[in-house]
Image: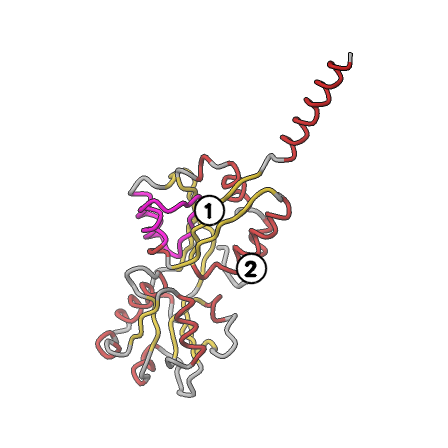
Amino acid sequence: MKNFLLKLLLTLLCAFFLAGSTLAGEVNLSIAASLREVIDDLSATFSKQNPGVNFLKNYGASGTLAKQIENGAPGDIFISANLEWMDYLKSKNMMDADRIRTFAYNTLVFAGSTAKQVATMQDLIKLEKIAIGSPKSVPAGEYAMEAIKKAGIERQLEKKLVMAKDVRECLMYAERGEVDGGFVYRTDALQARQAKILFTVPQDLYPRVTYPMGLTLAGAKNKEAEAFYKYLQSADAAAVLEKYGFGLK
């Protein structure tokens, strides 16, 4: 009888611990730098609801993140600041094609602390230094270069552009006054302390800033990553995105 009760107790304890650890593991996130605050907020809330889940977060330029994943860096969820780099990983068979969704939208602006009158793309010609994310890996820089070309001022700005590793570095240069201003997302500029939005880049000069998110093939096999991916599509996530100024439609 004692042996039976001991076995029963052990069985119940095992069941209890298994139930309590339904979600207990690591989730590797590769996230566009402009989403840092959003993802920090959401991952913190998710961790409180699921104490066993640990997030390893990698923020940076979308192109850099995509190349890292391609080269074997751990990544369960990838959120890019443009469609191009998501499509790139998809073409390399690194993403679960059925689990790619639009996460949010943004707007490109020109921000700085210069005293010069800057209200249009043409006004940029009179500036000395302009920060821009490297177009080869930073979507904000790619959007900005397209806008510059369509505005017909590429030649005039050619020697004035200061390349940054990501959109946050652009904002840092503008905040410090190391440049007259920089092309950043509206959501970044709203958090600036020194720099302010000088003008919004006309939407007809560049494609809409779209953030696709998806599970990698490895992430699709990770139940914790799958759960967080679903959470990123929840009303809670929508509220946090709106709080930081991102668009949902």
Q: Is residue 71 magenta?
A: yes
Residue nearer the viewer, 152 or 59: 59
Residue nearer the viewer, 246 or 31: 31
Residue farthest along the left direction in this orientation:
155
The alpha-carbon separation of the residues under discs 2 and 1 comes to: 24 Å
Badge 1 marks a residue whose secondary structure is: strand
Q: How is the image coloured?
A: secondary structure
The residue pinned by badge 1 equals 28
Question: Which circle, 2 or 1, is nearer the viewer?
Answer: 1
Near mark 1 (Cα within 10 A), the count class, few <14, some 14-19 or many ≥20, is: many
Three-letter code, disc 2? Glu
Badge 2 marks a residue whose secondary structure is: helix
Residue nearer the viewer, 81 or 13: 13
| Placement of 215 over or under 83, stated as above or below | above
Residue 221 screen position, x and y as percent: 45, 34
Three-letter code, disc 1? Asn
At a point 52% along the width and 48% down the height, the residue shown is 55
Residue 29 screen position, x and y as percent: 46, 49
Q: Is residue 140 magenta?
A: no
Magenta segment, which residues?
65-91
Residue 153 screen position, x and y as percent: 26, 76
Residue 242 screen position, x and y as percent: 55, 59
At a point 43% along the width and 48% down the height, the residue shown is 213
| Placement of 39 over or under 21, stated as above or below | below
At a point 42% along the width and 84% down the height, the residue shown is 114
The mark found on residue 2 in the picture is none
The mark found on residue 242 in the picture is 2
The answer to whether residue 149 is left or right of residue 174 is left
**In which quadrant will I find the N terminus?**
top right
